[in-house]
Every structure is written in C-alpha cells, then in structure tokens.
Image: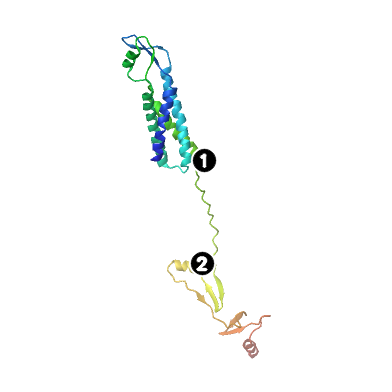
Amino acid sequence: MLIAVAVAAAGVLLGLLWAWLAPRVPLISDGKAVYLKNTEGEQAIGADGWFAILGLAFGALSAGAVFLLRRSGGIALVVALAAGSLAASVIGWRLGIRLGPTSDVVAHAKAVGQGVVFDAPLRIGAKGVLLAWPLAAMAVHLGLTALFGPRDPEPVPHWPGPEAPRHAGVAVTPYGVRGWPGPSSAASGACGCASTWASLPVRDARTAARPSVVLEGRTAVQPRHGPRLSRGRSARRRHR
C-alpha cells in the first residue's frame, strides 16, 4: 500500500514537467470563431510525445527505486507498483491540464481580443500514452528481478548408497555364538512364518577361542597348535 501511494505521489512531478515541456498549440480568433494559427503544426502530437517520454522515464526510475527498497519482490509488490504507476499517470495528466492554459477557449479569446495569438489548453489526443509509466515500470522491474533478484538455493543432490548384502552369518558374543537368518529366513518371514534366531551351544570362557568337534554326543576341544582327536576317539580305535 505504501509503495502504491509513494509512486502515485510522483505523478505530481510528472504533471509539473509536462506542463513546462509540452509545446503549445497557437490559436487565433477573428471575433466570431477560434482557429488554429498553423494548420500544419505538430504541437498537439508533441504534447502526447512528451507525456509518453516522461512516463517512460518515471516508470524506469520508480521501478528501480522499488527494487532497491524491496529486493525480495513478490506479487503484492508488483501489483502495488502497477496500480501506483497508473494512478501517477492520471494525476500527472490532470495536473498538467490545470497548470496549462485555461480550458475555456471562448473566454480566453475574448480576453485577449481579436487577431491576438493565444495558447490552446493542454490535452492528450492518444490516451494510450497514459500506459507508458505502468508498462515501463513493469518491464524494468521484471528485468532487474531477473538479473539481480535473490535466487533460491539449489537443492543438494542426494545419491543413495548401495545397499549392503544381507547374508547369513554368525555373531560372537561374550555369552556364546549366535546366528542370524539369511535371505531364506527373511523370505519365510515374509510369507507369515516366524524367523527365529538359531542359538548355538554356549562354551566355557576358557575354551571359547578353541574350535571344537562334536563326536557322538561328546565335544572334543582341539588344541591351538594343530588338530588332534580326543582320548575317547583314540581308545575307541584301539578297541576296534
């Protein structure tokens, strides 16, 4: 809202400059009617041209000022800038007409007398020049935002790592050896079958580091430095 009011207030300056720079259209009266002094003059077109040039300049300046004050932009800011620019054009147009020669041509002709040249009131022939300020403001603000506006941070790409293969294995714990199910057990669990951990016999802490061999219900602990069968196995061989 403040942006729209501030931009519209700048229309006063537009009206002042237009009333000062716009060329005057000379008129003359013969006592009965008022005529153009120069029928081929281009002063009327010049008034429209000066209004359009001033509107383009003020549109660019207002867009630059708004961008510097509110660099973040936004739809509300653009709408306020457009509305304020259109209001400023209308204010400048009406103010320039009031500051120029009087619009009562007949009274002015009688006041100056017969055969005396006087200026016609300011007017805009092509009402499209009122859009010069809004269009310039929108174009300049769009260009500044595209070139120097804030950018959204680019997302960091997330590359999923390879999944670790799931194999059946054995975990050695201080209380024994425990196994976990492999892919086959997972498949059985998916179909509704319970997959349980397979517990292996717990050995004494002194022999936990030695490999063992199960022979006919007996456990023979092999020595560290080489495979050797238990005494029960040797005695059985001699008996046979």
- Residue type at mark 2 is Pro
* Mark-to-mark CA distance, 1 and 2: 57 Å
Percent position of residue 96, x then y: 39, 25
Check disc 2 and report the residue beneath it: 183
Percent position of residue 55, x then y: 44, 29
Q: Secondary structure at mark 1?
A: helix
User: Disc 1 vs disc 2: which is toward the camera?
Assistant: 1
- Residue type at mark 1 is Phe
Which of the pair 145/222 is nearer the observer?
145
Name the image quarter holding the N terminus. Answer: top left
Q: Is residue 125 visible?
A: no
| Callout 1 touching callout 2 (CB < 8 Å) | no
Q: Residue at x 42, y 40 (%)?
A: 77
Crowding at mark 2 (Cα within 10 Å: few <14, some 14-19, many 20+):
few
The label shown at residue 205 is: none
Percent position of residue 158, x then y: 53, 54
Query: Residue furthest toward the right?
Result: 225
Q: In the rendered view, tell whether residue 42 sits above or below residue 215.
A: above
Q: Quadrant of residue 78?
A: top left
Q: Is residue 33 visible?
A: yes
Q: Secondary structure at mark 2?
A: helix
Q: Is residue 80 left or right of residue 198?
A: left
Q: Is residue 214 left or right of residue 115?
A: right
Check disc 1 and report the residue beneath it: 148
Which of the pair 127/156 is nearer the observer?
127
